[in-house]
Image (tube, rainbow, N blue to C red):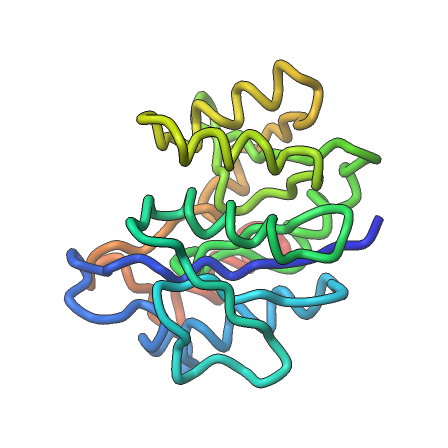
Amino acid sequence: MKLSAVLLAGGESRRMGRDKATIIVAGSPLWWRQIQLLQQLDPIEILVSARSDPTWRPTDTRFVGDEAPSRGPLSGLAAAFEQMTGTHLLALAIDLPFLTATQLTRIKDLTGAACGVLPQIRARSEPLAAIYPREGSPYFVRALRGDDFSLQAITRQMIDAGLLRLFDVPQTQEQLYRNVNVPADLPMSADLKQAMSDIGC
């Protein structure tokens, strides 16, 4: 497996009131935290998906722009599939600050040839912290041409086609998949330390 990675940072952050990528979490900008997280998975490349090239993007990453009109994460993933050089694509949203390298490594270890892994938290899947095989690209391209831009619908189709398998997240680790949408969601340093302690990370 040759793993490409994409950091999805193209959201408008309306509810947050500012760019999530530059928010300081536990002493570091969120973009830096997520890039460091991806690097620990040793991908062959890191892509940054956004509407325009961010000023914070590290020089050793590659910008992937959304084609207008943007369809949110779907557009970012479709564009990343077009430019990736690996056999699998690890997708990570900018607003998942609780995720750890340990958790992503578990997902990576479950990945097989031509088959990715989709975390499932109870009855809800998390398509923005998942690994997709290159063979899944047509599903994203086809969705962009239609009128249903739901990643949940796309991933269900890929599961039915044998291109994705579900990873049932243990209840004790569900908090790792919490995203931040409003200022009240932002974790303090103590919150992150306690979350890592609770799950043994």
Could you say which quadrant of the image residue 86 lies in?
bottom right
Horizontally, is 37 left or right of 113 in the view? Answer: left
**Residue at position x 53%, y 39% in the image:** 172
Q: How many marks?
A: 0
**Residue at position x 40%, y 57% in the image:** 66
* Residue 149 percent coordinates (x, y): 36, 32
Whether 127 is drawn above or below 54: the answer is above
**Residue at position x 51%, y 36% in the image:** 141
**Residue at position x 51%, y 61% in the image:** 7
Whether 126 is drawn above or below 66: the answer is above
* Residue 196 percent coordinates (x, y): 54, 59
Could you say which quadrant of the image residue 35 lies in?
bottom right
Q: Nearer the viewer, residue 138 or 113?
A: 138
Horizontally, is 14 left or right of 132 in the view? Answer: left
Whether 104 is drawn above or below 111: the answer is below
Whether 161 is drawn above or below 186: the answer is above
Image quadrant holding the C terminus, namely bottom right
Q: Nearer the viewer, residue 94 or 168?
A: 94
* Residue 80 percent coordinates (x, y): 56, 54
Horizontally, is 134 left or right of 35 in the view? Answer: right
* Residue 170 percent coordinates (x, y): 58, 33
Extreme top residue here?
A: 160
